[in-house]
Amino acid sequence: MQQEEMSFWDHLEELRWTLFRSVLALFLFAVGFFAFMRGENGLFDMVIMAPTRGDFITYRLFCLVGSSFSFMNEFCDTAFEIEIINIKLAAQFFIHMTTSFWLALVMAFPYLMYEVWRFVSPALYENEKKNVRWVFLFGTVMFFIGCAVGYFLVFPMTLRFLATYQISAAIMEQVSIDSYMDNFLLLIFIMGVVFEMPLLSWLLSKLGILNRRFFHKYRRHAFIGLLVAAAFITPSSDPFTLSIVFIPLYGLYELSAFFVKPAPKEDVETI
């Protein structure tokens, strides 16, 4: 059963408190990250700058796997380091603040989803609440998995290739902190959004816009497209690094197909 109907002003008041709690949570997380960002053992050096060094966990794992099969020896170079420079006077201070905010947004994401759930749940029936609760949980988990894939895989591979690519030996490679942070935040956020594809497919299926026939029909196209996308993300000559990126992307495609409704009976023969 639905709860007692709320007036317009009751809804407005509840929305005001929802926004207040959400902003307060973001502020507290941001303050916490801001406080622990600086220093040799701070979050910036230990987490955000970690992919610029040869001892980054992804490089060490690739070295371990590659050395076992006699390939990818470049990942075993512990002396590898990308030099990050700053050319703007106030850039480091503003990056300190913006990075704290973005990390707060990512880490507070489950709580923000909970606040959204609290706001919309009174308007739902019990059977609808069960579905929506599952949707919020699944979407949150997939977002974090996507961010993790972006941080541990997509960004390090992209950074390592682009920062070491040379069109001329006369050009000294130095990466500005602005460029580094723009790509860091963008790629990780994009991967978080990409991993919401199964959830988006499920919602479109519920609206009757998408069914499983679409995924069967365009599976070969998706295979080639995702393979090309993986090649752009990790432009390496060995198949291992290519497959490391391609397999999760293709897995998302198949997972999306699993969550949508089957094709109508009249379309089954054409699948």
Image (tube, rainbow, N blue to C red):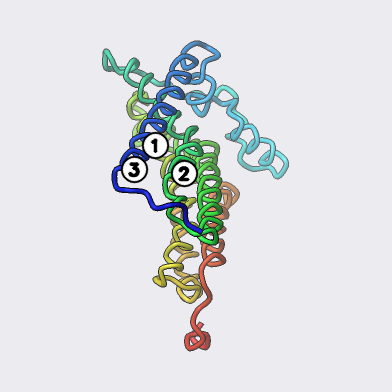
Q: Are marks 1 and 3 in contact (CB under 8 Å)?
A: no
Relative to 206, residue 89 above or below: above
Q: Residue at x 50, y 55 (%)?
A: 132
Q: Are marks 1 and 2 in contact (CB under 8 Å)?
A: yes
Q: Amino acid at mark 1?
A: Thr
Q: Report the Cα–Cα distance between label 1 and label 2.
A: 8 Å
The structure residue drawn at horizontal position 56% and vertical position 22%, both measured from the top left corner, is 79
- Graded by Cα atoms within 10 Å as few (under 14), some (14 to 19) or many (20 or more), the crowding at tag 1 reads some
Q: Is 189 left or right of 136, judged from the image as shown?
A: left
Helix, strand or loop at label 1? It is helix
User: Residue 118 — which label?
Assistant: 2
Question: Which label sits in the foreground, 1 or 3?
Answer: 3
> At label 3, which amino acid type do we have?
Asp
Residue marked by disc 3: 10
Whole-percent x, y for residue 158 in the image: 45, 39
Q: Label 2 vs label 3: CA separation?
A: 14 Å
Q: Where does residue 251 sit, x and y in percent of width and height? A: 57, 58
**Observer-nearest of 207 and 101:** 207
Residue at left offset 51%, top offset 49%? 136
* Label 2 Cα neighbours within 10 Å, binned few <14 / some 14-19 / many ≥20: few
The one nearer the camera, 138 or 234, is 138
Query: Which is in the foreground here, disc 2 or disc 3?
Result: 3
Pointer 1 residue: 18
**Mark 1 or mark 3: whose residue is earlier in sequence:** 3
